[in-house]
Image: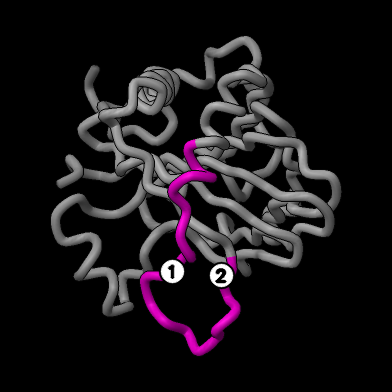
Amino acid sequence: MVATTDSYAVPIQAHPGALRVPSPRIEMYILRDFLTPAQCDTLIARIESHHRPSTITGYNGDDVFRTSSTCDLPSSDPDVADLRNRLCALSGIAITHAEPLQGQRYEVGQEFKAHTDYFEPDRPEFAKYCSVAGQRTWTYMLYLNTVEAGGATRFKVADKIIQPERGKLVCWNNRRPDGSPNPATLHHAMKVRKGRKYVLTQWFREHPWG
């Protein structure tokens, strides 16, 4: 598989179940039931056994900006490797351009305030995190459970709120058509009001990872 450099030449467009979000501001797709309930439960168990407090790449003065937990999922795990391969096939991006798969866990009251997944070119962390693999291009995010209340992902600029539903995949291009970072991808993982929320995120880069 060859990594695509054209942000609009992505196989997910041809998937019969993929719906493009009708917004001129962002290139985003939603695909329901990408994972089965059993697959979701397996991955939730992985997160439960290895999660730790989440961090941010650059401190912004807000100690409660991101209050979730994070879990790094190793590719040596067959279930993780299978999922990464499926996401690469769906995206058309070579697995060499994929970051390690990451899980997130949210308790009641936890959130990740409005942020973008790309690295701001004028920030110190850009040189630290983008010097080898380059900028983040696409985000593929999977909801592993249907949250009892709260926990939606809000894209304020694009005027879209996505509810967490078990097995649902949401993906978006972090760039504009000219390749520059798209600020319309600003999104907020809103507070969980009841229950827990489990998410998986696969980020892709401009150049091979590592």
Comparing 138 with 41, the one in front is 41
Q: Which residue is mark 1?
A: 55
The residue located at (30%, 43%) in the rendering is: 99
Regarding mark 1 in the picture, which secondary structure is present there?
Answer: loop
- Please tell me whether residue 52 belongs to the stretch shown in magenta: yes
Residue 174's place in the image compared with 90, above or below, is below
The residue located at (20%, 69%) in the rendering is: 128
Comparing 72 with 183, the one in front is 72
- Asked if residue 138 lies left or right of residue 95, the reply is right
Horizontal and vertical percent position of residue 47? 50, 43
Horizontal and vertical percent position of residue 206? 25, 44
Disc 1 residue type?
Thr
Main SS of the magenta part reads loop
Give the farthest residue toward the bottom.
61
Proximity of marks 2 and 1: CB atoms separated by less than 8 Å: yes
Residue range highlighted in magenta: 46-67
The residue located at (48%, 65%) in the rendering is: 53
Disc 2 residue type?
Arg
The residue located at (31%, 42%) in the rendering is: 100
- Asked if residue 118 lies left or right of residue 16, the reply is left
